[in-house]
Image (cartoon, rainbow, N blue to C red):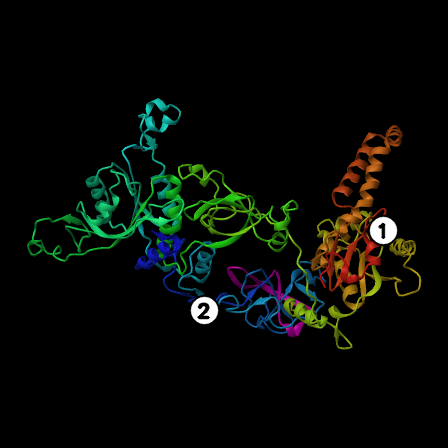
């Protein structure tokens, strides 16, 4: 009797990768590549825009540029028909509208994001103004930046999955060279077996046991092993149920070999009973096939009678020209027709698995599946091994090492309480990141339900004795981990290592964005120390002078609408509310902890102008916080300015600021019934309903509050009402703790 590791070594020494074949790449999913895949062309094959915006010459910005056409994904530059100029598209002062993925026209070398331009004469005026400098290559993917021509995309031995298929498709590689998938033939032996899926009468016998012979049981092994072979990547052949007759068994195996099987798997008939004929058949005692049995017993539980042999067909000549197989017993090979004289023998791997279903499942996972993977070309076909912590004591078998079925649970392992097991406390503290292994219950080899949900086989030594709860054991993976829901570790926040030089991060950030940062004493603005200062972006209060003013702007986009008759709050009042907030927070006086407030003026209250003013305030000053005064109905324009003018979010700030207004809203809706009743009697129900709808709309929009980050500063839009309360709820803690500890801040 040999050990299971020795058995695996013997099997893998006899299994070899099969011959190569070419397949359409979509059909190669699950296969192993036999040769590397290289890129026949670069990707992208042309300079491509990373985002929607305007293609420009970097030397022309900042400045106002004339739009001469458009380039869209899948379409080259189409010159604007209204442009009658004979100058080339890339002459000075020109820009081209461009979409994400579109080819950058020749002569242009940068793309300005659409949110970083403005339209001095309106959207249809044919000109754009760019306020920032951009370096050559900004927001452009150069030719071959993702994949270079000739680059090795996939290596020999890589297994083709969905992502590998996508890589091949991206590079335009149509065919894959893979190893041929082995053909695995499966049969069950036993006079007592009935096929549960053979006909409806037997299939219903589970509910009507009297319909089945008293001595019969359903054949579970064959269907289970066929599924296991498919899962391992093999093609399968179902040989059905074979009675306990050696000639019938030899015929079935010979039929599989004739059909081109690479592996034959039989369950049952490998023990020591008078009806167990498989080993004799494999040795050639009954003709048709013959071979060598490498082992017939293994020191393991379950699966001791596991048998492995190499066999070939006897009395057979394979027709090389047609691939048909014929019995030519008693015929001289020289008398055979042309094409049948060449005798071709094929060696087939044969496995005899125990008849008990758990033993069959375990031994297939340990020896047959690795053999299939080796034939497919896997570099390491053995079962993956990991470590786990036992969730309970497990008694050991006195005679054989055991492969104990278990499930894994990562979620419970760190929190598992071993407080009552002092002997294991230290082990647990050191192994908290290992999964917890839970036995699937009674491990008798006939109880197939012990395989339900099993993800690993715990490698337990021979007894006597037991392995204690909390012990670390090795485990062999037999199915995809986590399919039973146990793979769910808690989310962790990693420790961020700050760069030694802030200027390095500033340079990398500006380079990635293609922005040439303004310099102040040779220091980039992104790396400048942020002072305890708040910039408040205000804007002129623009009245609608007449009905014609409103009519003229009816077709103007909301982001550019300067005239409104409501929603523009007094900038002076917002400034005063901010200063009052600082005084009440105790940080407005002199000293190292004092904060100051200054005003940054926007051209008008549109979201585009407010966003530009907020960015300018963040980049040109050392303020840590930029506040945008409310603008537009329900502060919608100032809220949109945060979305348009920031590069990053700032989680948590907006919800904190809205909390104060949520309370005020609830008090208004719940406590003002009497007042609303009086107002309804004076002003009518319609007016009251309009006010209620407006209040609900204001609340649903987030009270005009939003937050983000730009150029190292935190930016927030303010509400139309309860401004000071919103500041107190959202910013008080930020005024006290060091800036580098602000939660959500990206330095």
**Residue 16 in view here:** no
Mark 1 residue crowding within 10 angstroms, few (<14) / some (14–19) / many (20+): some
Look at mark 1 in the image and give the residue it sits on.
728
Q: Is residue 538 left or right of residue 612?
A: right
Q: Position of residue 85 (x, y in %)?
A: 59, 70
Q: Which residues are magenta?
A: 51-79
Image height check: is 689 above or below 711?
above
Quarter of the view holding residue 516? bottom right
- Give the SS element for disc 2: loop
Image height check: is 406 above or below 139?
above
Image height check: is 10 above or below 65?
above
Furthest residue in direction right, as rendered: 589
- Give the SS element for disc 1: helix
Q: CA distance from mark 1 to mark 2?
A: 57 Å
Look at mark 2 in the image and give the residue it sits on.
151
**Residue 32 in view here:** yes
Q: Position of residue 598 (x, y in %)?
A: 87, 62
Is residue 68 within the magenta segment? Answer: yes
Quarter of the view holding residue 587? bottom right
Q: Position of residue 184 (x, y in %)?
A: 31, 48
Which residue is at the front of the view, 205 or 510?
205
Which residue is at the front of the view, 703 or 53?
703
Image height check: is 98 above or below 542?
below
Which residue is at the front of the view, 135 or 69?
135
């Amino acid at each position: 009797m040999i050990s299971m590791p020795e058995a695996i070594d013997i099997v893998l020494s006899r299994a070899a990768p099969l011959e190569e074949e070419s397949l359409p790449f979509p059909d190669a999913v699950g296969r192993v590549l036999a040769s590397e895949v290289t890129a026949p062309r670069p990707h992208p094959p042309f300079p491509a825009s990373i985002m929607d915006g305007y293609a420009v010459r970097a030397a022309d910005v900042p400045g106002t540029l004339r739009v001469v056409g458009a380039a869209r994904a899948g379409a080259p530059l189409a010159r604007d028909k209204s442009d009658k100029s004979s100058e080339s598209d890339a002459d000075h002062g020109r820009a081209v509208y461009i979409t994400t993925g579109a080819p950058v026209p020749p002569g242009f070398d940068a793309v300005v994001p659409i949110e970083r331009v403005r339209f001095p004469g309106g959207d249809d005026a044919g000109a754009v103004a760019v306020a920032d400098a951009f370096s050559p290559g900004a927001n452009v993917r150069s030719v071959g930046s993702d994949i270079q021509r000739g680059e090795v995309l996939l290596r020999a031995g890589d297994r083709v999955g969905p992502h590998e298929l996508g890589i091949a498709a991206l590079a335009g590689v149509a065919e894959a060279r893979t190893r041929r998938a082995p053909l695995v033939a499966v049969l069950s032996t036993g006079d007592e077996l009935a096929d549960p899926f053979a006909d409806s009468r037997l299939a219903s016998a589970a509910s009507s046991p009297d319909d089945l012979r008293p001595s019969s049981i359903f054949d579970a092994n064959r269907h289970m092993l066929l599924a296991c072979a498919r899962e391992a990547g093999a093609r399968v052949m179902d040989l059905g149920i074979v009675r306990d007759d050696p000639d019938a068994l030899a015929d079935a195996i010979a039929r599989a070999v004739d059909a081109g099987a690479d592996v034959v798997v039989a369950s049952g008939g490998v023990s020591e009973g008078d009806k167990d004929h498989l080993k004799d058949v494999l040795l050639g005692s009954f003709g048709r096939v013959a071979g060598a049995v490498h082992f017939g017993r293994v020191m393991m539980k379950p699966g001791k009678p596991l048998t492995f042999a190499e066999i070939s067909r006897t009395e057979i000549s394979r027709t090389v020209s047609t691939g048909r197989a014929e019995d030519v017993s008693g015929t001289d090979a020289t008398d055979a027709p042309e094409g049948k004289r060449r005798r071709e023998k094929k060696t087939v791997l044969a496995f005899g698995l125990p008849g008990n279903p758990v033993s069959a499942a375990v031994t297939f996972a340990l020896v047959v599946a690795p053999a299939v993977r080796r034939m497919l070309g896997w570099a390491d076909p053995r079962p993956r091994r990991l470590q786990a912590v036992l969730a309970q004591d497990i008694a050991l078998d006195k005679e054989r090492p055991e492969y104990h079925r278990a499930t894994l649970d990562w979620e419970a392992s760190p929190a598992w309480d071993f407080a009552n097991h002092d002997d294991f406390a230290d082990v647990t503290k050191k192994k908290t990141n290992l999964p917890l292994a839970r036995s699937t219950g009674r491990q008798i080899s006939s109880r197939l339900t012990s395989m339900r949900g099993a993800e690993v086989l715990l490698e337990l030594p021979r007894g006597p004795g037991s392995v204690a709860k909390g012990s670390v054991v090795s485990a062999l993976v037999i199915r995809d981990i986590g399919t039973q829901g146990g793979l769910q570790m808690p989310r962790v926040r990693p420790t961020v290592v700050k760069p030694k030089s802030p200027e390095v991060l500033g340079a990398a950030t500006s380079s990635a964005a293609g922005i040439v940062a303004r310099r102040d004493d040779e220091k980039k603005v992104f790396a400048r120390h942020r002072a305890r200062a708040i910039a408040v972006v205000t804007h002129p209060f623009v009245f609608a002078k007449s009905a014609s003013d409103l009519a003229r702007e009816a077709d103007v986009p909301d982001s550019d609408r300067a005239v409104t008759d409501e929603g523009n709050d007094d900038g002076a009042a917002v400034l005063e509310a901010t200063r009052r907030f600082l005084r009440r927070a105790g940080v407005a006086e002199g000293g190292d902890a004092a904060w100051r407030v200054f005003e940054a003026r926007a051209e008008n209250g549109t979201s585009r102008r407010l966003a530009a003013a907020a960015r300018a305030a963040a980049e040109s000053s050392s303020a840590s916080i930029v506040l945008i005064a409310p603008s537009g109905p329900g502060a919608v324009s100032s809220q949109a300015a945060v979305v348009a003018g920031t590069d990053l979010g700032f989680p948590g700030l907006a919800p904190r600021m809205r909390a104060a207004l949520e309370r005020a809203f609830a008090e208004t809706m719940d406590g003002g019934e009497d007042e609303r009743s009086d107002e309804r009697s004076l002003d009518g129900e319609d007016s009251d309903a309009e006010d209620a709808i407006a209040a609900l709309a204001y609340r649903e929009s987030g009270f005009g509050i939003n937050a983000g980050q730009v150029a190292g500063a935190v930016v927030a839009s303010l509400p139309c009402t309860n401004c000071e309360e919103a500041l107190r709820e959202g910013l008080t803690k930020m005024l006290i703790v060091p800036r580098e500890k602000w939660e959500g801040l990206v330095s």
